[in-house]
Amino acid sequence: MIKVKIVRISEDAILPKYATNQDAGCDLYGVENFILKPEERVSVKTGIKIEIPIGYYGRIAPRSGLAFKNGIDILAGVVDAGFRGEVCVVMINHGEEDFKIEKGNRIAQMIFEKIDQAEFEEVKDLSITERGNGGFGSSGIK
């Protein structure tokens, strides 16, 4: 388990919570009221700042119920260890109806993931594989 420091910067902020001790993601809550129209996107403030330990990042992910029932998705969901600004959630409405976001609603979830940074080595060529240069869909059913 990692320790994440958190600062409440809005009196309306609700600290992230896990619904159960088996959940991968903790709920993030909005501190603003919005009407999100179809195909519109908005950045919703959470009223919190966090300090994620080096070697981890926070991935902001959609809530499955909002995605399935309302077509609400999350964009730009990476919070790096070096970021110290307010956590905001970029939401988009893929549904056909307006979606009401109210202060205190659960709007997304954050999943903390361990990472490694790559060390790049420039070479003249790459090893040969069965897939080779095959692109999108090339390894699927024919």
Image (cartoon, rainbow, N blue to C red):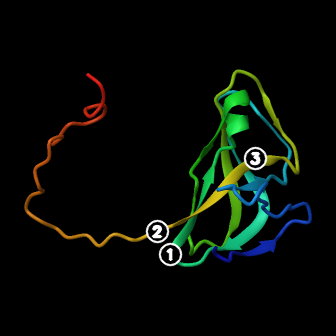
Left/right placement of residue 13 relative to residue 117 reads right
Task: Please report whichever mark, 1 or 3, sits nearer to the chain's N-terminal start.
Answer: 1
Label 2 – label 1 distance at C-alpha = 5 Å
The mark found on residue 72 in the picture is: none
Task: Please report whichever mark, 2 or 3, sits nearer to the chain's N-terminal start.
Answer: 3
The mark found on residue 115 in the picture is: 2
Left/right placement of residue 115 relative to residue 20 reads left
Label 1 – label 3 distance at C-alpha = 26 Å
In terms of image quadrants, where is residue 18? Answer: bottom right
In terms of image quadrants, where is residue 122? Answer: bottom left
Residue under pointer 3: 107
Residue under pointer 1: 55
Is there CB contact under 8 Å for labels 2 and 1? yes
How packed is label 2: few (under 14 Cα within 10 Å), some, or many (20 or more)? Answer: few
Residue 79 sits above or below residue 138 on the image: below
Percent of width and height locating residue 8? 83, 70
In terms of image quadrants, where is residue 23? Answer: bottom right
Closer to the eye: label 1 or 3 = 1
Q: Say what secondary structure mark 1 lies in.
A: loop
Residue 127 sits above or below residue 71 on the image: below
